[in-house]
């Protein structure tokens, strides 16, 4: 079997890449180890930058997003019992859109199916070979048979735990990493959102985030220990803690309802450099992870594959590799700025558990400064809505 671009992973990065390549008339095969249902039902990110929304619309996969996505023109920062609004549109002219990652993935899968191009779920034993040759290969099993896919290029879009990054020979990549001493306990609840916009709260008991997925479903998170045991968190305890951290002096608090899903998300900053090795290109979580506080993970995956698709299209059209050769450097400039922002938001909004009250006072001063200085608020807003892709 032969294809132009072999894509490992059908998350947002792999599926978006496949769609843009299709629009350029470039052939690809997408290989995914999980089932279609699993991939669609996986609840993860939900905040889309304006650039991500624009790209989805331009790529012909934004119809439902334009109809059902919830445009947010600002967020609230809450501390000492009061909310302070950051007006994105007033400060930057741009907005964000709340639309679940699972909805993005569903739309991209439907679009892929409509193209008739291959997307294989539940493949097993995926491995990549001959990466430094002109015909890198992907081997995998499907339907009880061994397959070998001969490619011009391979896109490693297989997430943090995938096989592409570890297939690059030792010594080529440098990894930069920070693991945080806390995690997020997240719930999805059948409750109408009590606010039209997100609320990021720093409380003396720790961080909490109020968010939403639809007009009937609220998404909430609270800071917990890195090794937290979910069993110790019955629904009543979760709600009690959320209300303690999120209830405001003006009476605002989240609406309570049945918990539909709950889980713990670890917090990590991670980047490998470079993001390419000969004809293998890493994109999205395969190359970098951000703590979710800045809502950047999904958006970075999309900006990576936009740059990769441009490099691939240019290479097929002109026979030149200059854009492709610059792929890693071009991505990393934006990736590191998103890393900085995600780290900064995380450090500002989470309690550091070293028993020293200095940091909490400093964090409150920082929040007070941000919410009272137009310059500081603009800096937060322009990063949150998304820096330019190029
Ligand atoms: C639990 C969790 C919660 C998150 N919450 C948020 C959030 O609230 N806000 C935010 O901005 N970001 C969040 N993120 C981050 C965001 O979801 C990711 O940045 C985004 O999914 C990256 O997309 P991706 O396509 O690069 O990787 P993924 O979405 O991880 O996709 C990779 C795909 O590759 C497949 N795969 C892996 N190995 C193989 C293999 N060997 N062969 C074939 N296929 C393979 C996987 O099954 C997966 O479908 C969260 C992430 C996690 C894990």
Image (cartoon, rainbow, N blue to C red):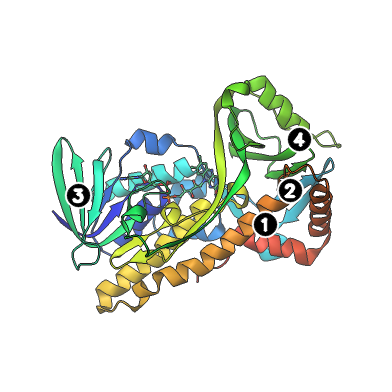
Which residue is denoted by mark 3 in the rendering? 139
Residue 336 picture location, percent across and down: 55, 64
Residue 179 picture location, percent across and down: 57, 48
Tag 4 near tag 3, CB within 8 Å: no
Tag 4 near tag 2, CB within 8 Å: no
Tag 1 near tag 3, CB within 8 Å: no
The answer to whether residue 360 is above or below residue 213 is below
Which residue is denoted by mark 2 in the rendering? 76
Q: Earlier in the sequence, mark 4 or mark 2?
A: 2
Which residue is denoted by mark 1 in the rendering? 344
Give the crowd class for mark 1: few <14, some 14-19, many >=20 residues within 10 Å.
some
Identify the element where label 2 is drawn.
Answer: strand
Q: Earlier in the sequence, mark 2 or mark 3?
A: 2
Which residue is denoted by mark 4 in the rendering? 245
Q: Earlier in the sequence, mark 2 or mark 1?
A: 2
Give the crowd class for mark 4: few <14, some 14-19, many >=20 residues within 10 Å.
many
Q: Is residue 343 left or right of residue 332?
A: right
Measure how far apart labels 1 and 3 are at the Cα level: 41 Å
Closest to the camera, between mark 4 and mark 3, is: 3
Regarding residue 215, the answer to whether it shows in the image is no
Measure how far apart labels 1 and 4 are at the Cα level: 21 Å
Q: Which of marks 1 and 3 is nearer the N terminus?
A: 3
Residue 290 picture location, percent across and down: 55, 52
């Amino acid at each position: 079997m032969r294809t132009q671009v072999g894509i490992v992973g059908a998350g947002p990065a792999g599926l978006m890449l496949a769609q843009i390549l299709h629009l350029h008339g470039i052939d690809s095969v997408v290989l995914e180890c999980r089932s279609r249902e699993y991939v669609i039902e996986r609840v993860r990110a939900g905040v889309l930058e304006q650039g991500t929304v624009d790209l989805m619309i331009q790529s012909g996969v934004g119809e439902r997003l334009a109809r059902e996505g919830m445009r947010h023109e600002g967020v609230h920062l809450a501390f000492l019992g009061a909310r302070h609004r950051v007006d994105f549109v007033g400060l930057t002219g741009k907005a964000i859109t709340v639309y679940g990652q699972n909805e993005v993935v569903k739309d991209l899968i439907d679009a892929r199916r409509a193209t008739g191009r291959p997307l294989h779920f539940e493949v097993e034993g995926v491995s990549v070979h001959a990466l430094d040759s002109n015909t890198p290969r992907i081997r995998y099993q499907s339907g009880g048979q061994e397959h070998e896919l001969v490619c011009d290029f391979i896109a490693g879009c297989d997430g943090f735990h995938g096989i592409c990054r570890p297939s690059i020979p030792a010594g080529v990549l440098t990894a930069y990493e920070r693991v945080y001493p806390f995690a997020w306990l997240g719930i999805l609840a059948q409750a109408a959102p009590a606010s039209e916009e997100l609320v990021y709260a720093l409380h003396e008991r720790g961080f909490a985030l109020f968010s939403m997925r639809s007009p009937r479903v609220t998404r909430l998170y609270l800071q917990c220990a890195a090794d937290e045991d979910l069993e110790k968190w019955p629904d009543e305890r979760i709600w009690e803690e959320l209300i303690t951290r999120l209830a405001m002096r003006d009476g605002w608090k989240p609406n309570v309802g049945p918990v539909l899903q709950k889980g713990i998300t670890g917090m990590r900053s991670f980047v490998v450099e470079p993001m390419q090795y000969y004809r293998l290109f890493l994109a999205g979580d395969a190359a970098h992870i951000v703590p979710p506080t800045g809502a950047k993970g999904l958006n970075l995956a999309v900006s990576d594959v936009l740059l990769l698709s441009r490099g691939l299209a240019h290479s097929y059209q002109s026979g030149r590799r200059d854009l492709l050769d610059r792929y890693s450097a071009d991505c990393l400039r934006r990736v590191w700025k998103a890393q900085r922002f995600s780290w900064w938001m995380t450090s500002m909004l989470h309690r550091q558990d070293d028993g020293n009250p200095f940091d909490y006072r400093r964090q409150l001063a920082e929040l007070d400064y941000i919410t009272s200085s137009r310059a500081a608020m603009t800096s937060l807003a322009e990063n949150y809505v998304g820096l330019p892709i190029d």
